[in-house]
Image (cartoon, grey):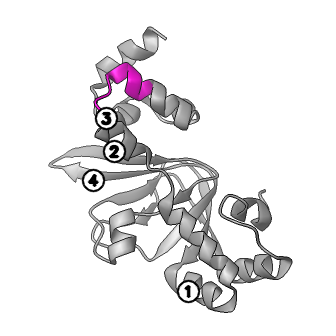
């Protein structure tokens, strides 16, 4: 199990008092496979650090699920537009497998910042490089997309099925299967 210090190390340096404060203001939550963490139309009011398991973020196009993001252990996860703008979510976040997260609500984040300025560094959670932006702001071939995501998030190819990865990369599952076969 990761310590609070290990969890926060990616965003800043914190005193032992800060670590205790964070532990008091965060909540551990468990999810079974297919449990919904964020429903369509719900306003995202928390950020989540994935301790174990994995999640996927998607929306529906008629009857098809389109994968927006794939989330793995040791990552911060949230619905960006809903959290930042406090508007109803256009996507759903669902557990892909048995998972455990550490939840920090926005209210508790504000409370932490009021108690210690070092928690301002948690703002880095919201500035993390977005793999989707890189993938879709560049004209990448299917093999370049697959190689990029394999390097950026190597566990994706071990955790999620081809169909979900293909949806995330916006390529046909058959194309992704061919790319993987030629690797």
Residue 43 seen in the current view: no
Of callouts 3 and 1, the N-terminal one: 1
* SS class, disc 1: helix
Question: From the image, which quarter does the N terminus lie in?
Answer: bottom right
Report, in whole angstroms, how far the alpha carbon at label 4 lies from the one at label 2: 7 Å
Q: Which label sits on residue 67?
A: 2
Q: Which of pointers 2 and 3 indicates the residue nearer the eye?
A: 3
Taking depth in this image into account, of 106 and 63 the one nearest to the observer is: 106
Q: Which residue is mark 1?
A: 110
Position of residue 146 in the picture relative to residue 88 (left or right) = right
Q: Quadrant of residue 145?
A: top left
Q: Magenta stretch?
A: 138-146
Report, in whole angstroms, how far the alpha carbon at label 3 lies from the one at label 1: 36 Å
Asked whether the residues under the numbered discs 1 and 4 touch, taking CB atoms below 8 Å apart as contact, a structural biologist would say no
Q: Which label sits on residue 18?
A: none
Q: Which residue is mark 3?
A: 138
Q: Which residue is mark 4?
A: 59
Q: Which of pointers 1 and 4 indicates the residue nearer the eye?
A: 1
Of callouts 1 and 4, the N-terminal one: 4
């Amino acid at each position: 199990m990761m310590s609070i210090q290990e969890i926060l190390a990616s965003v800043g340096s914190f005193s032992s008092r800060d670590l205790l404060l964070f532990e008091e203001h965060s909540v551990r939550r468990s999810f079974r496979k297919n449990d919904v963490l964020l429903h369509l139309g719900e306003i995202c009011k928390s950020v989540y650090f994935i301790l174990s398991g994995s999640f996927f973020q998607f929306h529906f196009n008629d009857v098809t699920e389109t994968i927006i993001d794939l989330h793995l252990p040791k990552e911060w996860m949230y619905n960006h537009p809903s959290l930042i703008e406090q508007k109803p979510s256009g996507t759903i976040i669902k557990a892909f497998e048995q998972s455990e997260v550490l939840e920090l609500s926005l209210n508790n984040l504000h409370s932490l910042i009021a108690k210690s300025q070092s928690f301002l560094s948690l703002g880095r959670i919201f500035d993390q490089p977005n793999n989707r932006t890189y993938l879709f702001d560049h004209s990448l071939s299917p093999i370049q997309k697959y190689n990029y995501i394999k390097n950026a998030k190597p566990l994706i190819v071990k955790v999620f099925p081809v169909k979900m990865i293909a949806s995330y990369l916006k390529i046909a599952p058959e194309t992704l299967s061919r790319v993987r076969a030629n690797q």
